Amino acid sequence: MARRKRSTRKKVVPPKRAPGRKVRPAPPPLPKPAGRVRCVVNGKPVDEACDSATRLLAFLRERLGLGSVREGCARGECGACTVLVDGRVVPACLMLACQANGTEITTVEGLAEAERLHVVQTSLLDESESSCGFCVPGLLLSAKALVDGNPSPSSEEIRLQLAGHLCPTTSCAAVERAVLRATRDVYGHAGDTRWSHRQRK
C-alpha cells in the first residue's frame, strides 16, 4: 500500500486571548453635524435646526407637517415627492434639507390663495377623472411650473414636463387638457392650437 503524503499546509491557529480580556466594542457612529435650515416655505419663513443628512422630503413632511410631499420610489423617478424650489421642479427625495438654505419652496399646500384654488388645481378638477390622488400633488406642481414659464406649451412640451411622473390612475390626456385650460385662463389663449377636441373623446 502506497504511503499517504503528509500535507505541507500550516494550520491557522487563532491568536490566544489573555484570560479575562473582553472584546472591545465597535466605536459609536460619529454624530452628524447639526445646522439650521433658513428658507421660505409656502410664503412663510422657516428657521429650523437640522442635521446635514436629513433629506428635504423628511424635513418638509415630518418637521413641517406638509403631507402632500410623499415618498414613492426614493430615487427621483416617480414624481410623488415633487416640490418647487425657486420655481424649479425638484424631487425632494434627492435633495438635502441643508441645500435649501436661502431658497423659496412651494408645495401643494401653498398653491391656493385666500382659500381660493390655483387655476391649475381647478383645471385638473374639471378635466380629470377618478384617481387615488397619491401622485396628484407632484403633477400639479409640475403643471404649475410649466404654465408659469411657458405661455403657449405644445402637447409635446406638456408630455415632456410630466414624463417624470409615474401615475397609473390619472389620465395623461386629462392632465394635458388641464394644462391647456390653465394656460387659457392665465394668458387668454388655449396654448397649442393643434390640440383637437377629438383627443378629449
Image: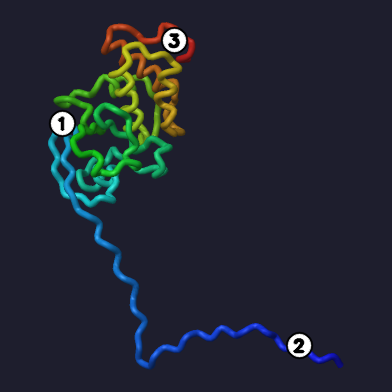
The quadrant holding residue 2 is bottom right
Left or right: residue 145 versus residue 74 is left
Residue at 37% x, 34% y: name it.
135
The quadrant holding residue 38 is top left
Residue 107 seen by the camera: yes
Residue 4 at x, y = what percent? Answer: 78, 89
Residue 122 at x, y = what percent? Answer: 28, 21
Q: Earlier in the sequence, mark 3 or mark 2?
A: 2
**Residue, disc 3:** 195
The secondary element bearing badge 2 is classed as loop
**Furthest residue in direction right, as rendered:** 1
Residue 150 at x, y = what percent? Answer: 33, 15
Q: Earlier in the sequence, mark 2 or mark 1?
A: 2
Q: Residue 5 bears which disc, if any?
A: 2
Q: Residue 43 bears which disc, if any?
A: 1
Circle 3 Cα neighbour tier, 10 Å, few/some/many (<14 / 14–19 / ≥20): some
Q: Residue 191 bears which disc, if any?
A: none
